Image (cartoon, rainbow, N blue to C red):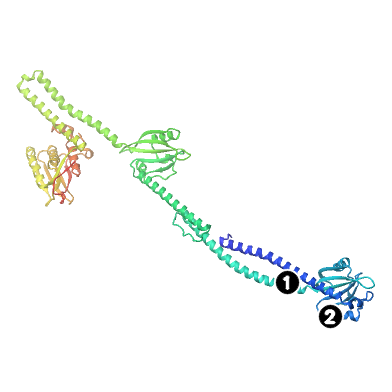
Amino acid sequence: MRLNLFWKLGLAFFALLIAVLLPVDYYAERTLRRDYERAGFEKLSAIARIAMASPPLASSLSTTSRTPSPALREWLKRMAASDVRVTVITAQGLVLADSQSDPQTMENHAERPEVREALAKGDGLSVRHSVTINRDLMYYATRLSMPSGPPVILRFALPLRTVDDEVWAFRRRLWLSSLAMLSVTGLVSLLISRSFSRRVERLQSFSRRVAEGDFRPIDADRSGDVLEALAVSLNDSAARLDHAIRTLTEERNLSRAILDSMVEGVAVVNSEERLLFANKGFAEILELDAPPQPGRSLVEIVRQTELLEAVRAVLKGASRVQAEITTGTLRQRFFAATVASVMATENSGAVVVLHDISDLRKLERVRRDFVANVSHEFKTPLTAIQGFAETLLAGAMDDPQNRIRFLQIILEHSRRLARLTDDLLELSKMDADRLDLEVDRLSVRQFVQSCLETTQGSAADKHLQVSANLQESLPDIAADRRRLAEVLQNLLDNAIQYTPSGGKIAVSASSDGNEVTFTVSDTGIGIPQVDQPRIFERFYRVDVARSREVGGTGLGLSIAKHLVEAHGGRIWVESEVGQGSQFHFTVPVFPPQQATPRLAR
């Protein structure tokens, strides 16, 4: 089980204290014992000197008899009373007398170390166990010269029990003081280690918070030590890291927001043809539900062979490759693909940018169709004018009847050319945003009535019934009277042209509070469903022969659409073949706070 820092420091302090106290106890005990032994030997030496200086001692000793004299027994009794054991030993090791034991029962002491040393040097010391009395003793032996005969050995002994008692008492005091010191120092060390470990744990917790993204600073202790400096350093590092991460996050979010808001599709592919990044535009272009997850293979996502070949060409070493891809079947879209090499890491990759060029291709098609239609529209009247002019020059001028008819035909086609030219100029102004509208407050009822009065004559010629169905209390609209009249008049003219004799034409208007919706209904031939989406295109005709027969240019509805949108409205058609048509367009309501006319472009 792993120990935390507190217990490690505490146990280390305890181990250090014990490691110090044990040698101190050991050496103190040895020193005390040595001092006590030295003091004991000095005491024994002093007793020996006093005994040897006593005159009756030498005279009372007999080296031939093991029975002590009365004087010797008296002296031995006094020595025993002082707790000092005295033994008289001959040079041969025979015990003559002993203050505590019967010399008859004692063995030869010639091999005792203190006896040998005393015989050799004059005195001898020894600390050992006494076999005779079964105790540990300190021995001091001295050589005593006899007046006649060989010398004898006087051996004095003190029991070690006294020394052991003193040493044990000292040891007890030492251990009690050591225990007290150990408790105090241990408690202090535990408090210090606990404080230190808590500070380290706070730093550890702070580093864990920083790793999890929480960069709040830690309160540094005012201790002035290295941990305070470490806390200050960690706070500074966390602040710098927080600033760096915030900067990188903002840059990443900004880059992602820019890429996601781009209409162009952007994707990054690594050298293994796996997707690293793709924005929403890329997913929308490829008709995916969501941007693909990084790590997917490009082949799983892209089905366009041209794009895959361009990416592979760049990954093989080309710096930039351009291609064009097409998506969709019913509604095709065209995209210009640019694939460039990128070296962000050790491995190469490619960045793919898909730019929508569908509008450009549509404009090219419209331009081609427009040129073809304009050429075709101009060709018919010009051919007629040229043909009848050549006929007149060839001699028809002398024929009064045909001359007038030919000139009328030339005049009619020239007027048609003029109308076509005027319509083209009008459309060109609209395309160039040079159409000036004098927007003013306009009464709906008066506006509709004025347009119907203009239409009554042509409608009466075809026996058509024209009526108005206007909602009560219609608000005024903000419009250019002349331009809006062109829209309504064009729709009425078309209704008259394509409604058989005896039919009905109705103009209605209603409001929802924000805009007024105008509707021109007829009981004419109607418009097929397939032609309705293109009815407002330039030169588009449902019935080409009938349109040319009535003198239409094919630009009226296109001009009407431009004018309605210039007013801020919209226009659409509802029709069924044989059931008539309903053309609707909206115009904004005149705002109450606007009291003066304004110009709109």
Residue 271 is situated, as x and y percent measured from the top left of the image, at 46, 38
Q: Which mark is residue 156?
A: none
Looking at the image, residue 573 sits to the left or right of residue 264; the answer is left
Q: Nearer the viewer, mark 2 or mark 1?
A: 2
Q: Secondary structure at mark 1?
A: helix
Looking at the image, residue 13 sits to the left or right of residue 365; the answer is right
Residue 20 visible in the snapshot: yes
Q: Could you give the CA–CA distance between mark 2 and mark 1, rounded to whole angstroms?
A: 28 Å
Looking at the image, residue 66 sits to the left or right of residue 452; the answer is right
| Residue matched to label 2 | 78
Q: Which residue is nearer to you in this view: 246 or 122?
A: 122
| Residue matched to label 1 | 167
The answer to whether 324 is drawn above or below residue 389 in the figure is: below
The answer to whether 315 is drawn above or below residue 516 in the figure is: above
Residue 354 is situated, as x and y percent measured from the top left of the image, at 36, 38
Residue 311, quarter of picture: top left
Question: Which quadrant would the C terminus be assigned to in this image?
Answer: top left
Residue drawn at x 25%, y 32% is 367
* Label 2 vs 1, first from the N-terminus: 2
Question: Which quadrant would the N terminus be assigned to in this image?
Answer: bottom right
